[in-house]
Image (tube, coloured by chain):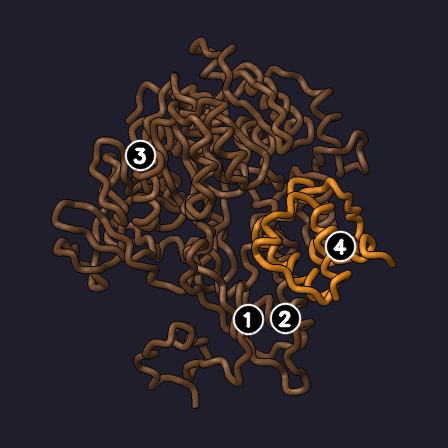
């Protein structure tokens, strides 16, 4: 499973919907349950799954799933 | 009140907000500028919303819905939700609304208790409904907004139904006391309670829209509230449209730059939002505000939880405007105690009664207090938008009234100039981002998690949310705490209840404090959290 597929699995778990198919352009407006509070759960789940930690300044720069993925890949490469 | 509003004794909210506006010559006026999350705009005139809601009324009639049946919307902000809400009211069925982030247990509580006969939702949210459908025998009809074909005899396509429905509908004369809108609200004990309103609530919703929010035909109004909650229906639909006001409805989520662009580009004159949003805006880069021309914006109002003075000072400095804090509850149906233009704002104060009601601070012994002492914030019963009952819970409803006064559950005091000041709740209900959350509901959901033996939930102060949910849990002996378990708990609560019910902090303790009759002593938990004296603990279980 590559990072993209793993991230998709995290989304499915966090939003309790096995049919979610993420795309790089996807934003919170594309998933009904994705609000500011569930975003906290998403970030925590991503950090736990990938064994990485993000600073607030990194998180607020994410405008879509693609940028989230780039950030994860950068952290994984630096490990 | 508002005798001009009621024509020929017709109190029907759906009619007043649409057909009556057309009858009065506003048919071609824009009622709603719908802006989706991609910022695409669609305008709907009063003629359009009249026709669309007529069609939905006919859809329900064709599906054998009748007066008094309960029909829910379970949708994120959308035009379909608004047409369905108004159409439901036009046939004198009860229009319930559900927050689109509710999980299946929250849905089951509300749909089950009300005996809802129908619901409109979308494909992605229907998954939650389908998981609990077999526990809802009364739920006969499910309408889905984003499918092209009917899925079965009772899972139906909105677009197909609307295509076949007539745009003409004769709204029967509706008496003032006919049930209209249903919202569920949380108490500190028991399940959420269904707050039932009547069509005559439109009188006070219209009055406060005009005299408090300063709405008139020339204004362009944006209420950011979700239609799943009372502000979204009372002031995102009913009040403004009863006055023929153009509303902007935005389907996207919070984004400071987008919001400022909307205020500027749509020339919004009156803006009604929430303290949590304002506090988030306050933390944004000032450059965002400086690049927008907000000269059309006349007034900013706020509702949901107390507005801290620093937000008002921020607005005065940045926007050169006060923010007018308003107070009401699901049960009150419309703004009750409030700041407004023309009344000097004392930052941190709730303001004064709306001019059409009587309020009082009453001691636990039943005496009216006038001397800055804290007591129960009460309203003289009988205002037009007063709730009619808690559905299936008349006893609890009756207990809210004593000697002709409604006890709001809030504690407050009144100063020598008649301003009211919020002090706190007299129960354990948590107000997080303007949403009331029952600690009992969260504690119950926590106990369904196999690893948890006991739970106690409190609200604790938070800079953005006003209060955050904090959960204390005792694990069963064979389990130990881990990051995995914490994540599972968070997700379970978010998906079964809602994201707003998810604890911001979870603390593991050896014993949840209870009194000798087994009641959780939440005030002790709160004192532990705050590092304060827990007070009298003589009743604490050994």
Asked if both marks, 2 and 1, belong to the same chain, the answer given is: yes
Whether pointer 4 and pointer 1 mark residues with C-beta atoms closer than 8 Å, the reply is no
Which circle marks residue B321 in the picture? 3
Rendering coords of residue B536 (x, y %): 31, 81
The Cα atoms of the two marked residues, 2 and 4, are separated by 18 Å
Q: Residues within 10 Å of mark 2 (few under 14, many from 20)?
A: some
- The foreground one among B189 and B467 is B467
> Which label number is shown at residue B486?
2
Q: Residue at x 43, y 36 (%)?
A: B198
Q: Colour of chain A?
A: orange
Work out whether disc 4 and disc 1 sit on a shared chain: no
- Chain for numbered disc 1: B
Relative to B349, B235 lies left or right: right
Q: Residues within 10 Å of mark 3 (few under 14, many from 20)?
A: some
Q: B70 or B354: which is nearer to us? A: B354
**Pointers 2 and 1 in contact (CB under 8 A)?**
yes
Q: Secondary structure at mark 1?
A: strand
Q: Nearer the viewer, mark 3 or mark 4?
A: 3
Read off the chain for label 4: A
Find the distance from the CA under tag 2 to the CA under tag 1.
7 Å
Q: Which residue is mark 1?
A: B506
């Amino acid at each position: 499973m590559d990072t993209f597929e793993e991230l998709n699995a995290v989304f499915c778990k966090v939003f309790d919907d096995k049919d979610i198919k993420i795309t790089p352009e996807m934003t919170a407006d594309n998933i009904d349950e994705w609000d500011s509070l569930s975003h906290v759960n998403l970030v925590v789940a991503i950090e736990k799954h990938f064994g990485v930690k993000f600073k607030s300044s990194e998180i607020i720069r994410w405008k879509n799933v693609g940028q989230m993925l780039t950030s994860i890949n950068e952290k994984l490469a630096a490990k | 009140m508002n005798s001009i509003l009621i024509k020929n004794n017709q109190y029907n909210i759906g009619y007043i907000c649409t057909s009556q506006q057309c009858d009065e010559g506003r048919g071609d006026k824009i009622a709603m500028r719908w802006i989706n999350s991609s910022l695409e705009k669609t305008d709907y005139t009063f003629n359009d919303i009249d026709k669309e809601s007529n069609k939905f009324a006919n859809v329900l009639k064709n599906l054998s819905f009748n007066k008094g049946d309960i029909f829910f919307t379970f949708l994120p902000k959308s035009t379909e939700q608004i047409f369905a809400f108004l159409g439901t009211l036009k046939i004198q069925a009860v229009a319930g609304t559900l927050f689109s982030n509710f999980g299946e247990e929250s849905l089951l509580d509300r749909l089950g208790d009300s005996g809802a006969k129908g619901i409109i939702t979308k494909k992605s949210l229907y998954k939650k409904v389908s998981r609990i459908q077999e526990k809802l025998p009364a739920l006969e009809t499910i309408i889905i907004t984003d499918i092209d074909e009917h899925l079965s005899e009772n899972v139906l396509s909105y677009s197909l139904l609307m295509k076949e429905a007539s745009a003409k509908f004769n709204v029967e004369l509706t008496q003032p006391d006919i049930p209209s809108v249903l919202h569920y609200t949380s108490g500190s004990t028991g399940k959420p309670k269904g707050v039932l309103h009547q069509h005559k609530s439109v009188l006070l919703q219209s009055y406060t829209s005009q005299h408090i929010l300063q709405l008139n035909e020339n204004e362009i109004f944006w209420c950011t509230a979700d239609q799943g909650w009372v502000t979204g229906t009372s002031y995102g639909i009913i009040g403004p449209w009863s006055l023929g006001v153009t509303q902007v409805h935005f389907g996207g989520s919070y984004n400071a730059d987008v919001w400022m662009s909307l205020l500027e580009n749509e020339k919004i004159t009156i803006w009604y939002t929430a303290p949590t949003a304002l506090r988030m805006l306050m933390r944004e880069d000032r450059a965002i505000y400086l690049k927008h021309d907000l000269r059309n914006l006349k007034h900013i109002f706020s509702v949901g939880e107390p507005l801290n003075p620093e937000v008002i000072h921020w607005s005065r400095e940045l926007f050169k405007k006060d923010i007018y804090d308003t107070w009401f509850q699901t049960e009150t149906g419309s703004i009750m105690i409030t700041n407004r233009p023309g009344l000097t704002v004392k930052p941190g104060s709730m303001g004064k009664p709306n001019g059409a009601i009587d309020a009082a601070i009453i001691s636990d012994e039943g005496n009216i207090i006038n001397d800055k002492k804290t007591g129960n914030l009460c309203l003289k019963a009988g205002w037009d938008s007063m709730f009619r009952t808690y559905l299936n819970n008349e006893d609890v409803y009756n207990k809210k009234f004593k000697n002709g006064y409604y006890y709001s559950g809030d504690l407050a005091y009144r100063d020598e100039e008649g301003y009211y000041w919020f002090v706190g709740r007299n129960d354990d209900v948590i107000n997080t981002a303007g949403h009331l959350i029952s600690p009992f509901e969260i504690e119950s959901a926590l106990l369904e998690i196999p690893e948890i033996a006991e739970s106690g939930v409190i609200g604790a102060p938070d800079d953005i949310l006003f209060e955050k949910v904090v959960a204390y849990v005792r694990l069963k002996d064979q389990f130990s705490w881990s990051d995995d378990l914490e994540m599972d708990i968070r997700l379970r609560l978010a998906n079964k209840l809602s994201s707003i019910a998810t604890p911001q902090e979870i603390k593991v303790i050896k014993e949840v404090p209870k009194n000798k009759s087994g009641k959780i002593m939440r005030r002790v938990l709160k004192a532990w959290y705050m590092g304060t004296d827990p007070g009298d603990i003589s009743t604490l279980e050994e």
